[in-house]
C-alpha cells in the first residue's frame, strides 16, 4: 500500500510504451496491456494515495496516444488492433473510479466515430492507400470501444445525452428502396465497400 502513490507514475510510463507495441506479437501486446490495466486498477484502489493531477496526467496520455494511432484493422481481415483494444480497456478502468474524467465530450465523439464512421470516396482518395474508417472493425475492438462508451456514460447525464443524440441519426432516415428490379452491384461503392445484401436470385428461399 505504501507504494501505491507511485503506481500512477508507473502506469503513465507503461501506457506510453504500450502505444509503441504495434509491431509486437498480438499475444505479447495483450499480456502487456493486461498488466498495465492491472497497475491502473491497483492504483485506483486507494484514490487518497495520489492527487487528481497524477490521474489526469495518465488520462491525458491515454487520450493523446489513442488519437495518434493509425487505423490498423481492415474489412477483409480478422487482424485485431491489440494496442487500441488495450488502451480502451485501460481507459475504461481509469474512468470507472475517477468520475471527473468523464466530462470530455470530445472523447465520447471520438470513440463513437471509431465505431461508426462511414468511409467515403473522397476519404479513400485522401487516405492514399491507408486503411479506411471506422477504426474499430473487429469484434474485440468494437466491444472494447462500446465498453468505454458505456463507462463514460454511466452516472453521467451529459455523456448519456450526447450519446443518445449521436445514436438517433443511425436509426432514422436513409434511402428507401422501392424499385422492383434492384441491382446492388450497379450501385456498389468499391472504394468503401458498403453495399448491403446482394440479391443473387435465391434470397426468397430465406423466407
Image: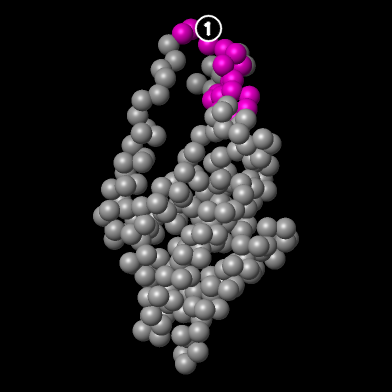
Residue drawn at x 39%, y 55% as measured from the top left: 150
Q: Magenta stretch containing residue 184, yes or no?
A: yes
Q: Nearer the viewer, residue 112 or 55?
A: 55
Could you tell me if residue 161 is visible in this image?
yes
User: Which residue is at 40% across, 75% downward?
Assistant: 53
Secondary structure predominantly adopted by residues drawn in magenta: loop
Q: 58 above or below 122? A: below
Between residues 109 and 28, which one lies in front from this camera angle?
109
The quadrant in which residue 197 appears is top right
Going by the picture, which residue comes out furthest to the bottom?
Answer: 2
Instruction: Answer with left or right where residue 63 lies relative to residue 83.
Output: left
Q: Position of residue 49 (x, y in %)?
A: 40, 85
In the rendered image, which residue does mark 1 sit on? 181
- Residue 51 in the figure: left or right of residue 60: left
- The range drawn in magenta is 179-199
Does the magenta segment cover residue 177? no
Relative to 127, does residue 90 appear above or below in the rendering?
Answer: below
The x, y position of residue 38, in whole percent, is 53, 74
Q: Which residue is more in the foreground, 137 or 121?
A: 121
Q: Residue at x 30, y 51 (%)?
A: 160
Colour setting: one colour
Query: Where 80 sits versus 187, above or below?
Result: below
Q: Residue at x 46, y 65 (%)?
A: 60
Secondary structure, mark 1, is loop
Q: Position of residue 99 (x, y in %)?
A: 33, 67
Number of marks in the rendered image: 1
Amino acid at each position: 500500500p505504501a507504494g501505491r502513490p507511485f503506481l500512477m507514475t508507473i502506469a503513465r510510463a507503461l501506457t506510453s510504451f504500450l502505444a509503441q507495441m504495434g509491431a509486437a506479437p498480438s499475444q505479447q501486446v495483450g499480456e502487456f496491456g493486461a498488466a498495465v490495466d492491472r497497475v491502473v486498477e491497483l492504483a485506483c484502489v486507494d484514490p487518497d494515495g495520489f492527487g487528481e493531477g497524477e490521474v489526469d496526467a495518465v488520462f491525458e496520455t491515454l487520450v493523446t496516444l489513442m488519437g495518434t494511432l493509425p487505423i490498423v484493422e481492415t474489412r477483409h481481415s480478422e487482424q485485431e488492433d491489440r494496442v487500441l483494444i488495450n488502451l480502451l480497456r485501460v481507459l475504461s478502468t481509469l474512468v470507472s473510479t475517477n468520475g471527473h474524467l468523464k466530462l470530455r465530450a470530445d472523447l465520447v465523439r471520438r470513440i463513437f466515430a471509431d465505431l461508426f464512421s462511414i468511409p467515403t470516396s473522397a476519404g479513400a482518395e485522401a487516405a492514399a492507400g491507408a486503411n479506411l474508417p471506422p477504426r474499430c472493425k473487429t469484434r474485440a475492438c468494437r466491444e472494447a470501444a462500446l465498453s468505454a462508451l458505456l463507462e463514460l456514460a454511466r452516472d453521467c447525464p451529459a455523456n448519456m445525452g450526447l450519446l443518445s443524440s449521436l445514436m438517433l441519426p443511425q436509426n432514422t432516415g436513409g434511402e428507401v428502396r422501392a424499385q422492383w428490379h434492384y441491382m446492388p452491384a450497379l450501385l456498389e461503392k468499391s472504394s468503401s465497400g458498403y453495399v448491403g445484401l446482394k440479391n443473387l436470385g435465391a434470397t426468397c428461399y430465406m423466407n
